């Protein structure tokens, strides 16, 4: 039971990391797009 709990925590951590990477990627793309529009204008 103990090992199952540890494995579950590891999977949750990987899932959280993937979500954070996605958020950072979207944020970076948004900033680049905004800067590009401002530079073009």
Image (tube, helix red, strand yellow):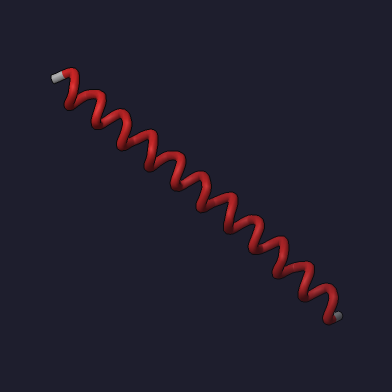
Which of the 4 image quadrants contains residue 36?
A: top left
Quadrant of residue 37 in the image?
Answer: top left
Image mark count: 0
Check the image and report above or below for 14 versus 28.
Answer: below
* Drawn side of residue 11 relative to residue 17, left or right: right
Q: Residue at x 59, y 50 (%)?
A: 18
Residue 33 in the image: state x and y as whole percent.
30, 28
Residue 26 drawn above or below residue 19: above
Work out which residue is located at the far bottom of the displayed protein and give it.
2
User: Residue drawn at (38%, 34%), measured in percent from left and top?
Assistant: 29
In this picture, is 16 found above or below 26? below
Q: Is residue 32 left or right of residue 13?
A: left
Q: Which residue is at the far top?
A: 40
Q: In the image, residue 27 lies at what x, y percent? A: 38, 42
Q: Which sits in the foreground, 1 or 37?
A: 37
Task: Give percent across and percent down for residue 34.
Answer: 25, 31
| Residue 29 horizontal side relative to residue 41, left or right | right
Q: Quadrant of residue 3?
A: bottom right
Position of 39 compared to 24: left or right? left
**In which quadrant is the N terminus drawn?**
bottom right
Quadrant where the image shows the C terminus: top left
Which residue is painted at 72% across and 65% down in the image?
10
Residue 22 placement (x, y as % from top left): 51, 44
């Amino acid at each position: 039971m103990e090992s199952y709990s540890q494995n579950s925590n590891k999977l949750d951590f990987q899932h959280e990391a993937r979500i954070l990477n996605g958020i950072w990627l979207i944020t970076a793309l948004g900033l680049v797009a905004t800067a590009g529009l401002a530079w073009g204008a």
